[in-house]
Image: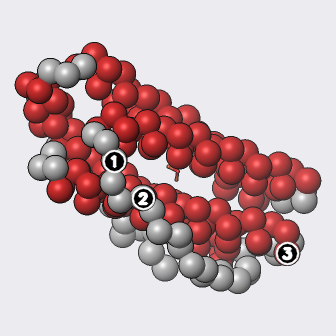
Amino acid sequence: MLSDRMQKGLNAQMIAELYSSYLYLSMNAYFKSVNLDGFANWMYAQAQEELMHGMKFYGFINQRGGRVTLEAIEAPPTEWDGPMAVFEDTLKHEQKVTGLINDLMEVALEERDHATQVFLQWFVTEQVEEEDSVGNVIEQLKLLGDAKGGLFMMDRELAKRQAPDMSTEIG
Ligand code: FEO
């Protein structure tokens, strides 16, 4: 059984993950609009991952006999000043999400909710990977500088990222 405080926190994090999906889908749309389809593909896969994260919270709240409550999802930004600006915003956003996951873990510790601590552990590890992969893209973009050919090659590289299989997370 979830405490009220824990349930509220898990619901809020579910919304934060769904907002992340919305944000990355908006970045996908931006990259589509400037014909960087590989960058767009990377963001599409990222948006799908966030949807999966949101659904993990959705499933966990239900599994624990809690009540999922859906709330309004804020509108994301729609315009950026190039790939570097997009990925800098992405890193900032992921750092913020890491903070939210850490805060939620604190609540789980205070509530002595061991099952939620174990559930959140997956997200603690995931955030390390997310910040790392976004940081790597930023490093590559820095190396390219203004070289247009390099951006084209990187676009082809980012086109290879696959979206996750969502079929196990719904329901
Ligand atoms: Fe689900 Fe990228 O945080």
Q: Quadrant of residue 86?
A: top left
Residue displayed at 45% across by 75% down = 170
Establish whether ligand 1 lies closer than 8 Å to the Cβ of label 1. no
Q: Which residue is mark 3?
A: 4
Q: Which residue is mark 2?
A: 77
Q: Amino acid at mark 1?
A: Trp
Residue displayed at 58% across by 62% down = 16
N-terminal-most mark, 3 or 2: 3
Q: Amino acid at mark 2?
A: Pro
Quadrant of image for the N terminus: bottom right
Asked if one can make out residue 169 in the rendered structure from this viewpoint, the answer is: yes
Considering only vertical position in the picture, is 62 above or below 42? Answer: below
Q: Disc 2 vs disc 1: Cβ atoms closer than 8 Å?
A: yes
Q: Is residue 139 left or right of residue 96?
A: left
Residue displayed at 21% across by 39% down = 158
Q: Which residue is mark 1?
A: 80
Helix, strand, or loop for circle 1? loop
Residue 51 x/y as whole percent: 44, 64
Establish whether ligand 1 lies closer than 8 Å to the Cβ of label 2. no
